Image: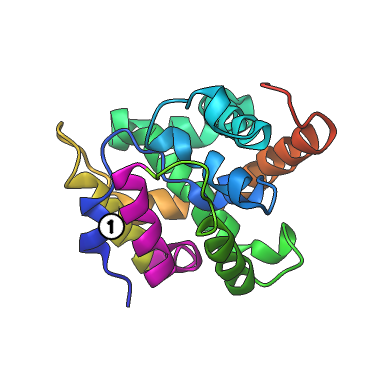
Amino acid sequence: VIHWQAYSQDIDEGARVNYLGHWLFSDPTPDALIGSLWPDFARRPDPNTVSEEFLIHFDRHQAIDKLTDTTPLLEPLRVALRPKLRKTTPIVVDMLIDHHLAKHWSEYHDEPLIDFTRKRYQLANQFRALPLPERMGKTLYFMERDDWLTGYRETNHLVRALGGMSRRIRFEDSMEKFGLMAIDTADSQSNLIYSYLTSLRFEILHFPNKTF
């Protein structure tokens, strides 16, 4: 059972929460996995306190977020969602991408999703360079305990996650109300999400230090 109340308590309005996407494009090491999520919880650390690998993945995270917000490939999805979701559209798009990834995982990775997530949780727990920000530590705990990333395959889990996000946002929003509509829209445009993710994978594979 996924405890979405805990989920909503540990995510704030600035979080992007596309954790599965960031880990898909991360190297399988503790420094890379933690670095690829750190920007959602804290500022860039002093370069003298972390590895180059951590910093590369920190910067990659920010580049991916920027590209996700601006790529023309996802503009039809943003346009379809914006009349109902307004300012929350970027957050919902991020979560829809993770839903797409979890639902179509075999198209992106050879390893079964449940094995992929289990190994990444174990590796992330081995990070020792810095103490984790408190909110990040709590989020990783619940993420592993309830396996949020695998849960994104299920429509009802995603709708409840959107509801959790809604309760944390300070302005009026409709993420939970229009969650099913958003999922249906994303599913109907899955070819565009696939095109975006495959183009992103190409960029990272051939230009791993690029900031896009």
The quarter of the rendered structure image containing the C terminus is top right
Closest to the observer: 51 or 142?
A: 51
Q: Quadrant of the N terminus?
A: bottom left
Q: Secondary structure at mark 1?
A: helix
Answer left or right for 165 relative to 19. left
Residue 172 image position (x, y, % from top left): 15, 35
Structure colour scheme: rainbow
Residue 76 appears left or right of 82: right
In this view, the residue in front, 182 or 115, is 115
Q: Position of residue 140 (x, y in %)?
A: 40, 56
Taking the view exactly as shown, the residue that stands out farthest to the right is 206
Residue 177 shows in the view: no
Vertical arrangement, residue 171 with respect to residue 143, above or below: above
The x and y percentages for residue 25 are: 66, 45
Instruction: Tell me the residue at 75%/35% (across/down).
Output: 204
Point 67% across, 31% down: residue: 52
Q: Residue at x 39, y 42 (%)?
A: 92
Residue 99 rendering spot, x and y as whole percentages: 50, 56
Q: Is residue 124 above or below residue 204?
A: below
Check disc 1 and give the amino acid type: Tyr
| Up/down of 179 relative to 54, above or below | below
Residue 183, magenta (yes or no): no
Q: Is residue 67 left or right of residue 111?
A: left
Q: In the rendered view, does 77 fall on the left or right side of 52?
A: left
Name above or below for residue 3 compared with residue 132.
below
Observer-nearest of 166 and 84: 166
Q: Which residue is mark 1?
A: 7
The answer, for residue 29, to whether it is visible in the render is yes
Where are the magenta residues, as a range?
Answer: 133-155
Front residue (pair 17, 153): 17
| 151 magenta-colored | yes
